[in-house]
Amino acid sequence: MMGRSSSSDDQSGLKKGPWTPEEDQKLIDYIERNGHGSWRALPALAGLNRCGKSCRLRWTNYLRPDIKRGNFTEDEEKLIIHLHSHLGNKWSAIATHLPGRTDNEIKNFWNTHLKKKLLQMGIDPVTHQPRTDHLDILAHLPQLLAMAANNLGATSLLNPSLFDMNLSTLMSQSEATQMAKFQLLQNILQVLSTNNITTSSIPQNIDPFYAVQLSEYLKLNPQHLQNLQELAMNEAQTASSLPPFSTTADFVSPSYSNHELGGSKGVGEHGGKEEYYGGFESVPPLVPASPENVSHGGDTHIELGNSTSILMKQNEHLSSSSTLTTTIDANWQDFMDDEASGCYWKEIIE
DNA sequence: AATCTGTCCAACCGCCAATAA
DNA sequence: TTTATTGGCGGTTGGACAGAT
């Protein structure tokens, strides 16, 4: 496989590009006899027309005898995801937990497979939280509202079985984001379907942070409340011949951990170059995919196969009412303090 | 069969921190 | 203390490859 440069000499006369078997053998022979010592001095001593950096990289990423080659196992996959949720793009730190795997290999595997997989699951690969793309929604809400106003959108939003049928179409590519948007819009409409919007009236299956933001905003802007309630009423009438209005919970997976992080068909043990990960019956409950929700290492111990940390965080987020109120108050204060986000719902609704 | 398109991954680049002089 | 060198890291590139058209 070729590198980024064609096989040629650079300005200093040193060779770049892919390594030949002869070069590999020279490097292996030298290091086995002498160790690598100074990487800078090694090429001349080993008879290689390469820079020391190139030699080091070739050795550490490819020629080292303890390199474990081949596809990643499911356990390795789970571990990488879990470690990444704590460490971020600290590939070398992650690699220390996977014997025989190099940081480069893990990085490539992440970028080509795992990131895609998490996105397919509606999970933000940076924050490891379910995606809401709340900033992106600002730009797309008009279209979402338009979709909600036509038969497909309204039917989908109000009827879970038809929603799932449409889902197979929607998910033909990386559409988990779109689904999250639908879900947020549905949350909005669900909040609007209650006449008395208070913190205590917010259904448990709606992310309270968003719901409280919305309700507070609507208290201050009753004209928007009226407009959106009319929209919600219209949608309900459109769907009046359909089964009763469903809650978001009908769409929501029992738990995030059931998403078979390692059990899905994909690359790795299953072979196959580019298999996609099906099974998008649902997405986890929405939480803001913002940096403040990222675990800051140390608050949860790392253990193989533990894919429940996010779920635990969600449960913490949703369960205790006193904690919830405190969290909401704090979040709301932050929200109001922030000039940019202070106009969040205003921009969405307007 | 030829061409196009998207994906993979080895290898490079630039930056930074640690160490040596 | 300052400067130079070295090793290590994360981000990015681009040729090879496979599947689609």
Image (spheres, coloured by chain):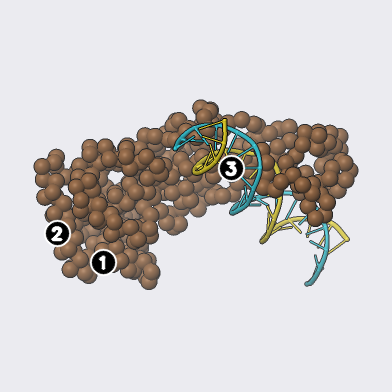
Chain colours: A brown, B yellow, C cyan
Is residue A320 visible in the rendered image? The answer is no
| Mark 1 nearby-residue class (10 Å; few <14, some 14–19, many ≥20) | few
Report, in whole angstroms, how far the alpha carbon at label 2 lies from the one at label 3.
50 Å
Quarter of the rendering occupied by the C terminus of chain A: bottom left
Tell which circle, 2 or 1, labels the residue nearer the N-terminal end: 2
Where does the image place residue A278, in percent across and percent down from the top left?
A: 39, 34
The picture quadrant where one finds residue A328 is bottom left
* Whether residue A69 is situated above or below residue A42 in the rendered picture: above
Residue type, mark 1 in image: Glu
Label 2 secondary element: helix
In the image, is A228 to the left or to the right of A208?
left
What residue do we see at 34% from left, 61% from top?
Answer: A138
Name the residue furthest top: A270
* Whether residue A336 is situated above or below residue A39 in the rendered picture: below
Q: Which is more toward the observer, A1 or A207?
A: A1
Where does the image place residue A310, in percent across and percent down from the top left?
A: 42, 45
Report, in whole angstroms, how far the alpha carbon at label 3 lies from the one at label 1.
42 Å
Residue of label 1: A350
Looking at the rendered structure, the number of numbered marks drawn on it comes to 3
In the image, is A143 to the left or to the right of A25?
left
Residue of label 3: A108
Quarter of the rendering occupied by the N terminus of chain A: top right
Where does the image place residue A109, in percent across and percent down from the top left?
A: 56, 40
Is residue A335 visible in the rendered image? The answer is yes
Chain ID at mark 2: A
Where does the image place residue C5, in percent across and percent down from the top left?
A: 83, 57
Residue type, mark 2 in image: Glu
Chain ID at mark 1: A
Residue of label 2: A230
